[in-house]
Image (tube, grey):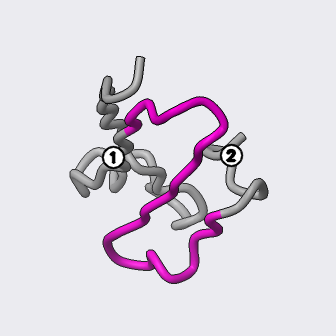
Amino acid sequence: MPGRTVEVRVPATSANLGPGFDTLGLALSMYDELEVTALEPGLLEVEVSGSGADEIARDASNLVVR
């Protein structure tokens, strides 16, 4: 169904911050947000925004694309 949109918001990871990362992760209030909109079959478009967006792959190496 082209045009249908789903939005997902999940807590961002705080892994590898060292001792106390679980507690720190709860206090950071950081999230990863994903919005997916159905396009025509065979059509794919990836837009990435926010801090570090220029480091995110927009091809099949990105799990969101798969």
Quarter of the N terminus within the rendering: top left
Residue 11, x across and y down, in percent: 35, 41
Q: Which mark is residue 53?
A: none
Residue type at numbered disc 1: Glu
Residue 51, x across and y down, in percent: 35, 77
Q: Between residues 28 and 40, which one lies in front from this camera angle?
A: 40
Q: Between residues 12 and 53, which one lies in front from this camera angle?
A: 53
Spot the residue most to the bottom. Answer: 54
Residue type at numbered disc 2: Leu
The residue beneath circle 2 is: 63
Image position of 25 with respect to 58: above or below: above
Spot the residue most to the top. Answer: 1
SS majority, magenta = loop
The residue beneath circle 1 is: 33
Q: Is residue 51 magenta?
A: yes
Element marked by disc 2:
loop
**Tag 2: Cα neighbours inside 10 Å, few (<14), some, or many (≥20)?**
few
- Residue visible at 72% across and 40% down in the picture: 66
Alpha carbons under labels 2 and 1: distance apart:
14 Å
Element marked by disc 1:
strand
Residue 19, x across and y down, in percent: 52, 61
Q: Return the disc, 2 or 1, that comes first in the chain's sequence.
A: 1
